[in-house]
Image (tube, coloured by chain):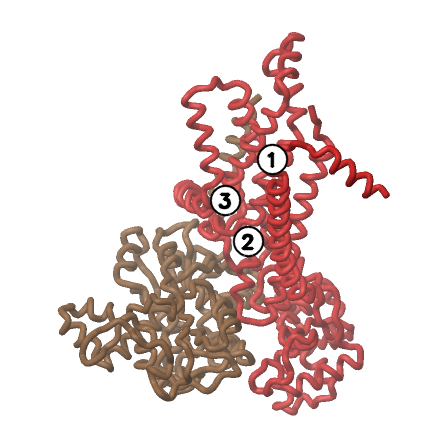
Chain colours: A red, B brown
Amino acid sequence: MTDVTLDTVATATPPARRDIGLKRRYAAERRFRLYGVLAILVGLAFLVVMLLSILTKGYTSFWQTTVSLPINFEEKVIDPDNKRATDPSVLVTANYPALAQKALAEKLGIDPKNKPMMTRLKGFLSDGSRVQLRDVVVSDPAVIGTTRNVNILAGANLDSAFKGQIDLTVPEERRKVSDQQVEWMNKLKADGAMAEHFNTGLFTFGASSRPETSGLGVAIIGSFYMMVIVLLLALPIGVAASIYLEEFAKKSRFTDLIEVNINNLAAVPSIVFGLLGLAVFVNFLGMPRSASFVGGLVLTLMTLPTIIIATRAALAAVPPSIRSAALGLGASKMQMVFQHILPLAAPGILTGTIIGLARALGETAPLLLIGMVAFVANYPATPFDPATALPVQIYMWANEAERAFVERMSGAIIILLVFLMAMNITAIVLRRRFERRW
Amino acid sequence: MKKALLTASAAAFALAASAGYAAARDQIQVAGSSTVLPYAKIVAEQFGETFSNFKTPVVESGGSGAGIKEFCKGVGENTIDIANSSRPIKKDEVKSCQDAGVKDIQEVKIGYDGIVFATDIKGPDWALAPEDVYKALAAKIVVDGKLVDNPNTKWNQVNPKLPDWDIAAYIPGEKHGTREVFEEKLLIAGCKKLGGVEAGKAGGLDDKAAEAACKAVRKDGKAVDIDGDYTETLARIDSNKTGVGVFGLAFYENNADKLKVATVSGITPSTETIAKGEYPVSRPLFFYVKKAHLGVVPGLKEYVDFFLDDQMVGPEGPLAEYGLVAAPEGERKAQREAFDAGKSL
């Protein structure tokens, strides 16, 4: 019915329309939308593949296999000559792995005199047991002579086997875990003595050559020091420079030159800043190598242009009417800037700063040259002590030969991504909350 | 305000810098070869655990050349104490060291390392000779006494006993210390055997140029330089099942469930064959100690002694377990004695 009327209307009054290519233009638009969707899909696909590969490889690193053993802290092993009252250092150097080994042999019902069997136990428990048991004894020497249950870390290969990451179908001599060890592992698993626990060590241990006792502790502290230094130095310098350039400096060739240079610096590869840091801070000023303070200075130089550009954009976005109003009411130029412009530009400045910090957090290249890509086992007490950074630790673990480091590397990437995401979300929240539109 | 901010920052900067000067270094600093790095890490870690009065040494990676360059920057707290190296220090490096005031350098040989060829575990057995490697991977090879551009595209053209695979080899990049061993023990050795040096000279090259022509690797994509580490090489083999990769012995042993190793000149690489000197593609590993820092940097002497102790570098020690080939007993003893005697280069 309606069709008919429409048809009749259409045929009754034929519109004398020009051909304006409506169909072609709509088709072009549809095609463009399609390209856009495709571009987004490609980007998303890569992101999903990357995240999936990291997550599937890395989530296991948050668990660590331990063996719960009743350790008999025998006096005749720890302190055979009973010297600990006069010489406490015997407690530090005692043969603790032997205690763990003995407890494991007992648990598995192996005769300690059966040497071939005892050698097969090698690698079942982590050598980190030395430090683990030493810490127990040193913190409480009264434990000597008693028996106490301790969760000893399993060796890296056993840990991988327990998590099912070692293909047990390949011939025994080609893999790192023997059939005998697998049998013991299954026995302990059935007993409930061998189990996975949350891997706190991943966050607290320093670097180590053993996967099971290596962690991000030093890297997290190093990254934290550097972020604090970057924030303390880059924010005031960057904001001061941009306020001067934007509000006070007269436009001249000189300021144009500065502007070009700042934009240029923002695009300079980060390794160049590392070279600069090595030449100026380490070689000329004689600052210590591998120190997070020097790393912080280098990253400050790298972040400055980003902060200056973001701050200038934020300052320029404040409408001139605010300036005129402030000046018209008798404010000095400085009062105008600090009481009116800066508060309004603050969200933009903070966003720029956080994004700059996030970029600095993920940098490795400039740190390579100032010696921060290093094996550092001790916590840095001050920013002048040797330290590493999160991305550096990822790089170091990626270079390791042992299988168990692969999951740790992916785990570290997950942790770094979480930090970055937290920073970027903060930036978005700050912007949403304080942003003003005119 | 701006001025105040700037002065405050500058003041903080200067203060911090002077604090940096003031704090005496109580931690050994080591840098250099990425091949030696895992061994140095193991020793550093155990050193820190055993000697509770010293901090765990800091070990940087970055390559032999870069490590020696840092080492030769001079004497003092902000220079490193030890340079790890996968090759002996060169004469011009010693000279640049001495020019910078590093007069006495003590050389310590820690053991041997071997590089191996390996293919995917499911592939057939491989038996290579230096000639095969030269004929497959050199840019120019000898045909009828003349150097011509390498025409080979398949391994069985090189040697009928090798499989019918397209040549795809993943070899250490030019900045790797391993590259030198690869060039010297395989390319140049194979080249000499096939008369490449004579052919080069006949073509009007001098001794040096003829040798350089021998070790030039083909650039047509059949030999791929890997500038990263062995993990990258392994990934390449994973994605190209007919690829051949060059690995460190330790790396291969850690991944023996994924890789199959090739024999070179009929010898299967292992710690035993390398220690005996039978396996041709091996090299000694070193570190260099700054003598002026001994007794100044706390723990440095103890660290070197600990490193050279048989419980570390011996055939039963953790380094051997990781893949280092221990030097024969006499050599280890000589190293200890030379270090104690303070013998320097």
Graded by Cα atoms within 10 Å as few (under 14), some (14 to 19) or many (20 or more), the crowding at tag 1 reads: few
Spatial CA span between label 1 and label 3: 65 Å
Which chain does the numbered disc 1 sit on? A
Residue A388: which disc? Answer: 2
Identify which residue is drawn at 50% across, 57% down: A374
- x%, y% of residue B272? 43, 85
Graded by Cα atoms within 10 Å as few (under 14), some (14 to 19) or many (20 or more), the crowding at tag 3 reads: many
Residues at discs 2 and 3 both on one chain:
yes
- x%, y% of residue A390? 59, 53
* SS at circle 3: helix
* SS at circle 1: loop
User: Callout 2, which amino acid?
Assistant: Thr
- Residue occupying the far front of the picture: A12
**Quarter residue B266 falls in:** bottom left
Above or below, comparing residue A96 to residue A2 in the picture: below
- x%, y% of residue A242? 54, 27
Q: Which residue is mark 3?
A: A294
